[in-house]
Image: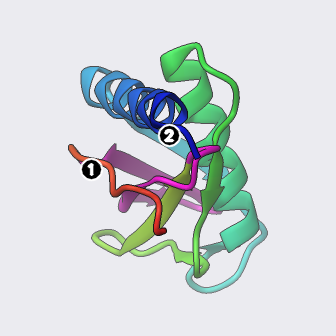
Amino acid sequence: MSKARKTTGISILTAVAAGTLLLGCSTSVEVKKSTPPKLSAEKLSSTLSQKLADATGQPKPHVSCPEDLVGKVGTTSRCTLTADDGSTLGVTVKVTSVSGDQIHYDYKADDKASPASS
């Protein structure tokens, strides 16, 4: 992989992180009723990907969340954004409130990307 491609990937991740940090990064998603409500890992990944793309004006990044988000205030989860070059950026999600079936959460990307593994 060329140095230019790695630099481009890290630049994209940096732009995502900067864009995310500059915005009031919170969102809410309505989920099917359960006690407490849960947002599936797939839906959380998809929603974060769209929100990050909207925040940065870049194409939707690949975001992977390993577990469902439980709708309980204070619950946190860690997701991973992966660039085309394989470099990664962590994204922390924290539940801020729950209104019936709707989970409200904030998200924040890490300040620094991890380079792709060789």
Q: Residue at x 56, y 55 (%)?
A: 86
Q: Is residue 117 above or below residue 19?
A: below
Residue denoted by label 2: 27
Dividing the picture into quarters, in which one does residue 16 lie? top left
38 on left or right of 4 = right
The residue stretch that appears in magenta: 83-110
Q: Residue at x 54, y 33 (%)?
A: 5
Q: Where residue 72 appears, x then y in whole percent? A: 41, 75
The local crowd at label 1, few if under 14, some if 14 to 19, many if 20 or more residues have their Cα within 10 Å, is many
Q: Amino acid at mark 1?
A: Asp
Q: Nearer the viewer, residue 113 or 98?
A: 113
Residue denoted by label 1: 110
Q: Nearer the viewer, mark 1 or mark 2?
A: 1
Dividing the picture into quarters, in which one does residue 66 lie? bottom right
In this rendering, the count of numbered labels is 2
49 on left or right of 55 = right
Q: Is residue 19 above or below residue 20?
A: above
Q: Is residue 47 magenta?
A: no
Q: Which mark is residue 24?
A: none
Cα separation between marks 1 and 2: 18 Å
Q: Farthest front residue? A: 2
